[in-house]
Image: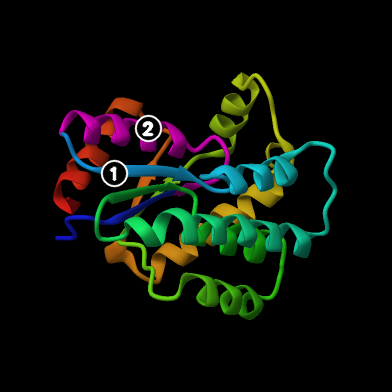
Amino acid sequence: MYKKPIIVFEGIEGSGKSLHINNVATYLKKKGKKFIKIREPGGNQNSEKIRKLILNNKSNFDKVTDLLLYFAARNENLKNIIMKNVGKKIILIDRFVDSTFAYQHYGMGININFINEISNFLLKNIKVSFTFLNLVNEKNMKIRLKQRKKLNRYDKFEMSFYKKVQSGFIKIASKNKKKYLKINSNIDIAINKEIIIKKINKLI
């Protein structure tokens, strides 16, 4: 179908997206497939510096500053990693464009046209092939966050914020259902792992 796709794992905190992207990376490695795995914010040396700024518990940036920092980190990934590898390797990304719209527009209320304009300028012809949208309920999210050794700034918002963000993700996915698979992160991890790997095999 895509052979060398760009595959993104999206979802709010505690939704299991990072766990599943790591499982997929392990699977691809065993199959001998050429791939790269990056995260947002982060992914390369410069982006990781920006990540520390954004997620630092002492940071108190304005929401527009946050948005521009996310875009800065993404631009470093696009220029230094994604554009150099697109079509050559499978690209796995832990959070990407949808997170910006879900968090900064649906969650924080920043103008969607403003976000869209900068996003299109940065992305140019880069398009996501498929997205796994991991969904989690309030109870399980709280349990998983409590299990974390350290919480960053984005782990500490009000639950109402995460509900708006998750609702935003669902709205985004509903506009192009063929390129999204919703993963119910409230069920057994092994079941979801099997569902995801089955879809990965079709994508590659």
Quarter of the image holding residue 104?
Answer: bottom right
Quarter of the image holding residue 58?
Answer: top right
Q: Amino acid under label 2? A: Asn
Chief secondary structure of the magenta portion:
helix
Relative vertical location of residue 118 with respect to residue 41 in this rendering, above or below: below
Report the span colored magenta.
10-31
**Residue 44 at x, y = what percent?**
53, 45
Tell me, yes or no, whether the highlighted magenta stretch contains residue 148. no
**81 to the left or right of 106:** left
Residue drawn at (83%, 59%) of the image: 62
Q: Which residue is mark 2?
A: 22
Residue drawn at (32%, 31%) of the image: 23
Category of crowding for the residue at label 1, using alpha-carbon neighbours closer than 10 angstroms: few (below 14), some (14–19), many (at least 20): some
Q: Amino acid under label 1? A: Phe
Q: Label 1's element? A: strand
Category of crowding for the residue at label 2, using alpha-carbon neighbours closer than 10 angstroms: few (below 14), some (14–19), many (at least 20): some
Q: Which residue is mark 1?
A: 35
**Which of the two residues, 148 or 173, is positioned nearer the viewer here?**
148
**Which of the two residues, 108 or 56, is positioned nearer the viewer here?**
56
Relative vertical location of residue 19 with respect to residue 104 in this rendering, above or below: above
